Amino acid sequence: MRNQLKHFIDGEWVESTGSETYDVINPATEEVIGTISMGTKEDLDKAVAAAKQALPSFSQTSKQERVEMLERIAEEYEKRKDDIVETITDELGSPQKISEKVHYTMGYNHFSQAAESLKDFSFMEDRGGHTVVKETIGVSGLITPWNFPTNQTSTKIASAFAAGSPVILKPAEMTPFAAIILTEIFEAAGVPKGVFNLVNGTGEVIGNGISSHPDIDFVSFTGSGAVGKKIMENASETIKNFALELGGKSPLVVLEDADVEVAARAAVNHIATNTGQVCSAATRVLVPSKMKKSFEEAVLKVLPEFPVGDPREDNLIGPLISKKQWDTVQSYIEKGVDEGASLLTGGTGKPEGLEQGYYAKPTVFTDVQNSMVIAQEEIFGPVTTIITYDTLDEAIEIANETIYGLAGYVIGNDPENLRKAATGIRAGRIKVNDTEADFSAPFGGYKQSGIGREWGDYGIEEYLETKTILGFPS
């Protein structure tokens, strides 16, 4: 059992002022694996006061001091690798391979990349006798989601630290223990008192408290569009700045000259990784009409390479995070059938032999129209849709017919068509032929996928304000 009934405030683990607790469930076993305290407004106020007190000194630390702090954090993070992998496997239900290769690795990369980006970052620019200065935005409130307990949490914290901003973190209730390990890492790395504060709790109390708190200058949130709108509303009361990384319904455009099996494997991988619980997952696969049959056959061929089952065994697809999310995914599969889409594979119910745990069948719909609910709404599970097109212009048009614009993917060989598709898709990040991630490159979305950018120097920029000093002496 992992129990943490305290919050981390001003450099110390302190008792909550409230008595409410929350049981964390392992989605693979449906068993309680630990308990956390639900924070109160009083707990949040204490954390904000600690961060506010730390702001003057931390914001004035040198760039080199913050680089060294981030490098120490990365070193301590590496020491906790086994703990992080084990914890994410338990609280998220992530297969151990994914916990290590994706979750652990992304967290480490954000801290190390922030240190590298900071080394070359300029906080002062001379403009012909005048000076433009970039200063920390102030106290930052961070609200992170359950689906990536290290990725979004680490990129936000690393960017804030690089900018000299003290933070208050509210992790998701369903996956809090990775954040608790991060807190222990910060203790070991010597992060100054008040610079990092952790308050567990609900979105209603702590999340709303962060976005409306008069002493919090900036809010960074990753999650649903509905909550993002509430944060904007709350932030407007004090005209505070914010960054939002929200949902997606990303297209994967398969070009006519693409290797069909490579494209099919990429499509399946998008719903297999993290059990499809990825905001940037490509869940609209756009395939040339003449390739439809061969692509469907290729999907059925590669799907067995992604077995579903116990995260502690040799599987690549684990359970969904909760019974509620399982029910949501089932309702979307039912909706797809009702809308007239064809089930290529999968469907409702649990995979055979997996009655315990929130497992869902990897499901692929074909004969899908882009106007269908399953092609427009974020399902957040192992479900994808195959949509056909006749010309590349039509594919780009279909790709852009969505309220989202977080990511896009293109697979093919002809450089001109790859470029045309990549530049034509209106989304914040485009990957061509499954290129490796670059942690120095910005991440964020167009349209209702969000506001602002994370990762690398663009992430640091979000935590800064710009000051112009006219007539600054040389």
Image (cartoon, grey):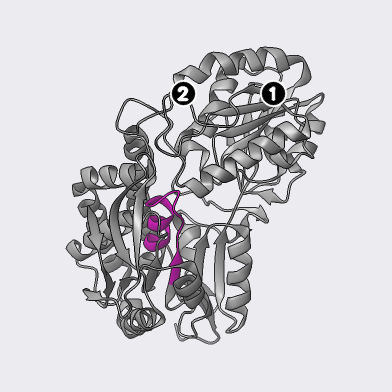
Numbered label tally: 2
Residue 164 seen in this snapshot:
no
Kindly identify the residue that appears in the image at 66 percent across and 53 percent down.
446
Kindly identify the residue that appears in the image at 54 percent across and 29 percent down.
362
Label 1, residues with CA under 10 Å away: few <14, some 14-19, many ≥20: many
From what the image shows, is residue 204 above or below residue 305?
Answer: below
Q: Quadrant of the C terminus?
A: bottom left
Kindly identify the residue that appears in the image at 56 percent across and 74 percent down.
241
From what the image shows, is residue 266 above or below residue 274?
Answer: above
Q: Secondary structure at mark 2?
A: loop
- Residue 254: image x %, image y %? 67, 25
- Residue 167: image x %, image y %? 38, 72
Amino acid bearing label 1: Leu
Q: Quadrant of residue 139?
A: bottom left
Q: Secondary structure at mark 1?
A: loop
- Residue 80: image x %, image y %? 21, 49
| 96 lies left or right of 245 | left
Q: Nearer the viewer, mark 1 or mark 2?
A: 2
Outermost residue toward the front?
355
Of residue 38 and residue 252, the one placed in the foreground of this image is 38
Of residue 139 and residue 345, the one placed in the foreground of this image is 345
> Which residue is disc 1 drawn over?
255
* The label number, if any, that marks residue 352 in the structure image: 2
* The label number, if any, that marks residue 299 in the structure image: none
* Residue 107 lies in the magenta stretch: no
Q: Which stretch did the figure color magenta?
A: 141-158
| 12 lies left or right of 410 | left
| 271 lies left or right of 70 | right
